Image: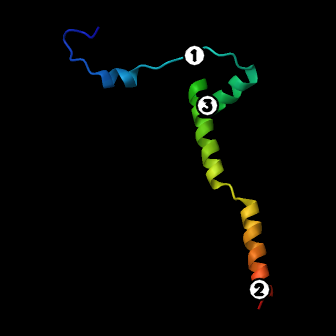
């Protein structure tokens, strides 16, 4: 129940409350996560951001090969 001297704002509670879950993870995974952030949760979030960024920046080698092959074939026709 909200305090009497304050108005009740459900949005505020939504952002303040967090769910947590107890999970078992290996010791080395804890160490790895803690190298990316101050807590295990923050470390996992930081790893996810870095993985997504790496996926966006990664070259699609097969697409490059196809484009080069098509260009070389088009030069052979002239």
Asked if labels 2 and 3 touch by Cβ distance under 8 angstroms, the answer is no
Tell me the quadrant of the picture where the N terminus can be found: top left
Tell me the quadrant of the picture where the C terminus can be found: bottom right
**Which class describes the residues within 10 Å of circle 1: few (<14), some (14-19), or many (20+)?**
few
Asked if labels 1 and 2 touch by Cβ distance under 8 angstroms, the answer is no
Residue 14 vs 22, above or below: the answer is below
Q: Please tell me which residue is depicted at 62% across the width and 52% down the height of the picture.
A: 56
- Outermost left residue: 5
- The residue nearer to you, when weighing 42 against 59, is 59
Estimate the x, y position of residue 16 in percent, counting from the top left. Answer: 39, 22
Q: Which mark's residue is nearer the viewer, 1 or 3?
A: 1
Element class at badge 3: helix
Q: Which mark's residue is nearer the viewer, 3 or 2?
A: 2
Q: Is residue 37 visible in this depiction of the protein?
A: no
Q: CA distance from mark 3 to mark 2?
A: 49 Å
Res 73 → quadrant: bottom right
The residue where tag 1 is placed is 21
Q: Please tell me which residue is depicted at 72% across the width and 25% down the height of the picture.
A: 29
Please give the label number shown on residue 2.
Answer: none
Element class at badge 1: loop
The residue where tag 3 is placed is 44
Q: Earlier in the sequence, mark 2 or mark 1?
A: 1
Q: Earlier in the sequence, mark 3 or mark 2?
A: 3
Residue 30 vs 22, above or below: the answer is below
**Which class describes the residues within 10 Å of circle 3: few (<14), some (14-19), or many (20+)?**
some
The residue where tag 2 is placed is 75
């Amino acid at each position: 129940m909200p305090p009497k001297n304050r108005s009740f704002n459900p949005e505020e509670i939504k952002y303040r409350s967090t769910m947590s879950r107890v999970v078992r993870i290996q010791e080395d995974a804890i160490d790895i996560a803690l190298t990316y952030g101050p807590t295990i949760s923050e470390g996992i979030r930081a790893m996810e951001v870095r993985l997504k960024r790496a996926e966006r920046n990664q070259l699609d080698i097969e697409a490059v090969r196809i484009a080069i092959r098509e260009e070389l074939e088009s030069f052979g026709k002239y």
